[in-house]
Image (spheres, grey):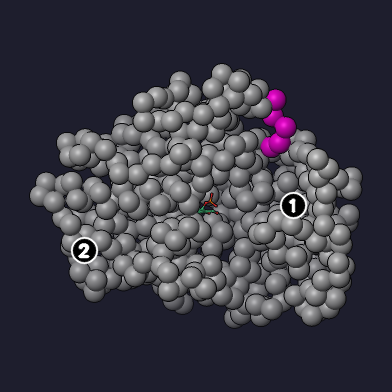
Amino acid sequence: MVLRQLAPVPQASRNGNTRPAKESAVLQRDLSYDFALLARGEGNYLVLEDGRKIFDGSGGAAVGCLGWGNQRVAEAVMKQVLAIPYCATVFYTTGVQEELCCYLVESTKGHMGRAYIVNSGSEAMEAAVKLARQYFLELTPSQPQRTRFISRRQSYHGITLGALAVGGHDYRRAKFEPLLMKNATRVSPCNAYRGKNPGETDEDYVARLAKELDDEFQTVGPDTVCAFIAEPVVGAALGCMPAVPGYFKAVAEVCRKYGALLIFDEVMCGMGRTGTLHAWEQEGVAPDIQTIGKALGGGYQPVAGVLASKHVMDVLQKGSSVFVHGHTYQGHPAGCAAALEVQRIILEENLLANVRAMGALLSRRLKERLASHPNVGNIRGRGLFWALEFVANKATAEPFPVEDHVAMEICEKGLSKEYLVNVYPGSGSADGIRGDHIIISPAFNIRSDEVEWLVETIGRLVDDYFAEKR
Ligand code: PLP
């Protein structure tokens, strides 16, 4: 069989100009952007079929944590696939699944009791939501009235219907709103750039947000809430936004007051991306349920997971002892093998220390290079997870019109021969619809000379883009 692409056809671009674009038989493709055939990865570079060699400054969508073409991970997957590629987990388990779950549980220093391995962040969030519900059904005495979830606006917790329902991504929800469960409501995100009132201290801001959450519990019925859901560092939806100090302690306190669980979505910010294996370690607050994804397997296999705390597991074990959930490909041996090898390499090469050191350098250099740019409104992040938020007016933080697609255009321009850099677009950071940011999230093994090149190249890209736009 000959693999081929559909023939090129002229394509109306998003700006109304007709330009040649490639055709594709792939269903999920926005043809208004140029796209290229990816031939292979070499360390921190993506090599395209047309010969372009692009520095991967974002590891795809903050997925790649070891770069590409890692021989050890490839061999570990190959060995596992040849040994046994699939395991129906009712009667069987595999050494790689047991070892990975054991490693994940132990990495939480006694807080978590069990791990569950799935194939994507959305699946992990679906499982987390159902686990919280089942926990309350099996608690003594049972609390079947707990059917609600509270999350935050401008949050993204996955694309499947349950995960979309508990998220606050307006654009991704809009068309499917009638299909989404109605028992999920949202409060304000913690956004030091746009959410704080003028002159408001961090303490006052935290107190205001905690009160808003408390009020939401009161509005929906305090004993009807299963869980509050949040990302410790908000990824795609808001742009690498850490909370202000004390925020998570305050919201955890509200959850405790009303007996609700705390679910942390660490699909994007977890597994070392922010400098500690779990982002919550830097908040001094451990969740009852946690999801992980992208940097778990570093892109070598589709693999994600759910961690359940000891007390959640105790309740299930004393109750039905079975989580009423399951996927054909849960605990997939190839995914587990990839994740295990990726995590071994992170440990052996002490890469979390590198994330912290290179993260500090990246933060400092980004601010030196771009903080004074008239269209860079805010630079924020943690570890190797940074975002630039672009604004039309720096003094008022006014975002660009949505139709300008600023973040997408910058990322697209970055792939051209003048820059050869890959950064990841986000949008909606101002109010959920308007607002642009790009994400810079390189591999955990990035070197200081690569950080310097990356910042200088992104600096040049941003300068050129806005100079041409004016
Ligand atoms: N949660 C967060 C915070 C994410 O960033 C994502 C994906 O970007 C998801 C959940 C969903 O993960 P996936 O795309 O693997 O289904």
Quadrant housing the N terminus: top right
Residue 214 at x, y = what percent? Answer: 26, 67
Q: Secondary structure at mark 2?
A: helix
Q: Considering only vertical position in the picture, is 3 above or below 231?
A: above
Q: Mark 1: which amino acid? A: Asn
Label 1 – label 2 distance at C-alpha: 44 Å
| Quarter of image, res 216 | bottom left
| Quarter of image, res 9 | bottom right
Q: Residue at x 35, y 44 (%)?
A: 325
Residue at the extreme front of the image, as rendered: 1
Q: Residue at x 67, y 49 (%)?
A: 60
User: Is 120 a magenta residue?
Assistant: no
Q: Is residue 177 left or right of residue 85?
A: left
Mark closest to the chain's N terminus, 1 or 2: 2
Q: Considering only vertical position in the picture, is 178 above or below 72?
A: below
Residue at image mark 1 = 422
